[in-house]
């Protein structure tokens, strides 16, 4: 019998297809929330709220200023698989006044890490 998959998984390399599929179906059916640490180059994948992933990363040693939340949609292809929206992104002190990641450099970094650690919009197996 396979070991149960936790609600949030910390990944420093590409998440496996089975855990990704389970997390997608567990909470939303068509997407999974994730939070990346742009300095440590790791991600927390899963959870009902971005705050779940944020907490897991903070507990593992991340700094709040390095964490950005987004959503990953498998099977939508490279151009449509990411949505850069999360309540944890509202940070006036860092120049981000909305839920959307406004800084294109931060957005590009989140995109790079998401593609490396989660996926590039491929269908689930």
Image: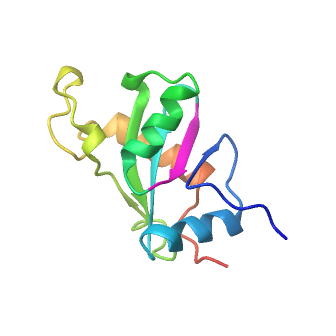
**Figure quadrant of the N terminus:** bottom right
Number of numbered discs overlaid on the protein picture: 0
**Which residues make up the magenta segment?**
41-47
Query: Relative to 85, is 118 on the left or the right?
Result: right
Q: Position of residue 6 (x, y in %)?
A: 62, 54
Residue at image location 36% in from the left, 35% down from the top: 105
* Snapshot quadrant of residue 27: bottom left
Left or right of 113 in this view: 99: left
Q: Main secondary structure of the magenta part?
A: strand
Residue drawn at x 70%, y 45% as measured from the top left: 13
In percent of width and height, residue 26 lies at 51, 70
Residue 48: image x %, image y %?
41, 57
Residue 29 in view, yes or no: yes
Q: Is residue 101 visible?
A: no
Q: Is residue 121 left or right of residue 100?
A: right
Q: Residue at x 61, y 71 (%)?
A: 21
- Determine if the magenta segment contains residue 38: no
Query: Residue 90's quadrant in the figure?
Result: top left
**Relative to residue 60, is residue 122 depicted above or below?**
below
Front residue of 118/8: it is 8
In front: 73, or 79?
A: 73
């Amino acid at each position: 019998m396979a070991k149960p998959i936790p609600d949030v998984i910390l990944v420093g390399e590409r998440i496996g297809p089975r855990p990704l599929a389970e997390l997608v179906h567990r909470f939303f059916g068509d997407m999974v929330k994730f939070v990346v640490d742009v300095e440590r180059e790791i991600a927390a994948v899963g959870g009902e709220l971005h705050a779940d992933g944020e907490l897991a990363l903070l507990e593992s040693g991340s700094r709040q200023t390095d964490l950005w939340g987004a959503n990953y949609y498998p099977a939508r292809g490279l151009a449509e698989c990411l949505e850069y929206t999360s309540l944890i992104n509202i940070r006036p002190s860092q120049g981000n006044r909305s839920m959307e990641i406004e800084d294109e450099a931060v957005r590009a970094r989140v995109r790079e890490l998401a593609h490396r650690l989660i996926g590039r919009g491929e269908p689930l197996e």
